[in-house]
Image (cartoon, grey):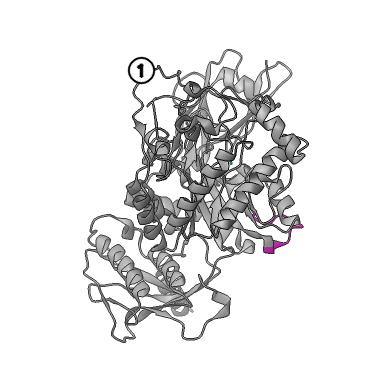
Amino acid sequence: MRFSLIAVCLLFTIYSFAQNPKPAIVPEPVSIIEKQGVYSLTENSSIYIAAGNNELGRIAAYLQKSINTSTGFNIKTSTATSTNGIILSLNATADNELGNEGYTLNVTSDNITVSANAPAGLFYAVQTLLQLLPKEIESRSAVKNINWTIPAVEIKDYPRFGWRGLMFDVSRHFFTKAEVKQFIDEMARYKFNLLHMHLTDDQGWRIEIKSYPKLTSVGAWNVKKTGTFNYFSNPLPDEPRNYGGFYTQDDLKEIVQYAKDQFINILPEVDVPGHSLAAIASYPELSCTPGADKYKVNSGEKFMVWPPKGHFYGLVDNTLCPANEKVYEFLDKVFTEVAQIFPFEYIHMGGDETARNFWEKSPQIKALMQREKLKNLDEVQSYFVKRVEKIVNAKGKKLIGWDEILQGGLAPNAAVMSWRGIEGGIAAAKEKHEVVMSPSTHVYLDYMQGDASIEPPVYASLRLSKAYQFEPVPDGVDPQFIKGGQGNLWTEQVYNMRHLQYMIWPRAFAVSEAVWSPKEKRNWDDFAGRVEKQFERFDLADKKYSPAIYDPIVTAKKDAQNLPVITMATEIKGLDIYYSFDNSFPDKYYPKYTAPVTMPKDAVTMKIITYRNGKPIGRMITISAADLKKRAGIK
Ligand code: ACM
C-alpha cells in the first residue's frame, strides 16, 4: 500500500516534470495538440529545404538568422534530404484546408517538420516556431546556458481572413525608410500581411511624384514643434520649414520588396479631397479657394474645428477642388506613378473628413452642381470619388476609401474601409461591396490605452480588453464581403519609434488574433496570459510596449453629498489595488480596494497602484480631485 502510494507520487512527479509549458502563441493557432517530449536545438541542428526554390531559401535564412543571433550557434541550411533537424517543405499535393497561408508544424524529439502549400505558410510556421522556443530566442545577442528546447506539438494553422493589416501614418510625423522596415519586421512576427501606408495628409506629402516635384520640395516640410499636437503655436513666417521628409520612388520600391519578402503587401493611401493641405501648399491652384500665400503645410497648429455635436469645418481650405479639371489631371498623374510603385491590387484614396465649408461658398462648385445636376455637397463628394475611381481603375487598380466615400452614393466598384464604427462596412457589404473593418471603437491604435491621467493625451481611449472584442464580421452581414480588418496607427502624437511601439503593442496582438484566429477560440483570460508571455519576449528584444493592462480602470459616480464615489477594476485577474487620498505614495500597506470608496471632501489627489503576489506591477497613478469630480459628473 505504502509502496504503491510512493510509486504513484513518483509517477506523478515524473509526469509533471515531463509536462511542457503550455505553448503561448499569438495569434492563437487553429489547433495545437501538445505531446510528450521536446526537440533540443543544438549547434548540430540544421535546417533542410528542397533545392532550387529561392523563397524557401529566404525563409530558411530568416529562421537561421533568428536562431543563430540569440543562441550563438552556427546552424546551417542544407538542401540534402534528412529526417533530423528542421525540415521546411512545400506540399506536393495541396492540403485545401491550409490555403495559401496555412501550415502544419510537427515537433518531435527527432525533428521539426513544417509543411505548407505555399511559401507564406512556411514563413508563418517559422513565426510560430520562434514563439515555441524559449523567450531568450528574442535576444539580440547570444545567450549562454539555455536549453534551447521546443515542446513536442502538432499544430495546424491557417488565417481566418486574407486582409490582416496595420495602418501606419507616416504623414503626421515622418518615419524613415529604416523605421518603416522595422515596423514591417515587427508586424510580420504576428502574421500580419498588409501594411497600409498613409502617405499624404495636411502635415506632409511623403511620396516622390516626378510630375509634381513641389509635392515633396514644399509639401514634405513643416516647422518642428514639441508639446501637444493640435495645440501648437502658429509658426512664424521666418521659422525654418525643415522638419519632415519623404520617400523617393526608389525608397518605396525597396520598401515594397522588403515587405514582400516577409509576405506583406503595401496599400498606398493618397488622402483626397480632404486632408490635402500639403498638396495645396505645394500647388495652390488645386484648391477652390483663391489665396496662394495662405497655404502652408500644417505644423500641428489648429486649423480645423470639431464642435462636439456639430459639423466640423476648416479654418483654411485643405481640400482639393472637385470642380477643377486640373485636379483630375493631377490625380491622373499621381495615381499613374503610385500604381507603378506599388504592385498591390488596391489604391486607397482616403476620402475621410472632408471639410466642405469652403465648397459651400465656391462659385466653381455651384457651377459644377448645376452642370452635373448634383443636389447637395454629398453628391459633389460622390462625383469626385466616382471620377477618382475611374482614374484608379484605368491604372489597373481597384479603389478603396474610408467610409465617407459612401456619402452621396458609392462608386460602382469601390471597397470601403469602415472606421466610424462598423456601420459603413455593414452598409457597403449590403450593397455587395468589399469591406475592410477598422472601427475606431476597437482598433484605433493611436487612442490612449490606460487611465487618461497618465497616458499621452489624444482623442479617446481604447483598452486592450476592448480591442480584443474586435469582430470583423457583424451579425447579419454576408462574410464573403468582409475581406478582413486592420488596426490604424495615426501619428499626430507619435514622434518616435519607441512611442510608436508603445502605442501598437499589445493592442496589435488583439488585432492579429481577430483577423487570424478562429472566432470560437476567443478567450480573454487565456489571451491576457499569452500577452504577458509576449511582454517577456519584448523585454528581451528591447521592444517597448504599453503596460496599461496592469493599471486600474477608475470610474466615479456622485453621491448624495455631491462627492465622487470611486469604483476601481482591473482588466486582468489577480491584481490588488492600493490607494491614498493624502498625497502620499500608496504601497501594499495602504488601504486595499475592495468596494467603491467615497473621496474625502478635502482630498486633492487620489494615488493608486496595483500589486500582484505582493509585488508592485502597475504604474503609480495620480488623479486630481477635480478630475474625479469630472468623471462623477460633478460641476
Ligand atoms: C480617419 O480616422 N479619419 C480615417
Q: What residue type is labelled 1?
A: Asp
Pick whichever, 107 or 125, lies toward us: 125
Element assignment for label 1: loop
Mark 1 near ligand 1 (CB under 8 Å)? no
Residue 442 percent across, percent down from the top left: 60, 45
Residue 152 percent across, percent down from the top left: 42, 75
The majority secondary structure of the magenta stretch comes to loop
Magenta segment: does it hold 440? no
Point 60% across, 17% down: residue: 600
Label 1 sits on residue: 238
Q: For the C terminus, which image quadrant?
A: top right
Q: Is residue 370 above or below residue 574?
A: above
Magenta stretch in the rendered image? 471-480
Pick whichever, 561 or 218, lies toward us: 218
Q: Crowding at label 1, few (<14), some or many (≥20) Cα neighbours within 10 Å? A: few
Residue 602 percent across, percent down from the top left: 57, 12
| Rendered image quadrant of residue 321 | top right
Residue 148 percent across, percent down from the top left: 30, 67
From the viewer's perspective, tell me whether residue 138 is left or right of residue 371.
left
Magenta segment: does it hold 479? yes
Point 38% across, 55% down: residue: 253
Residue 528 visible in the displayed image: no
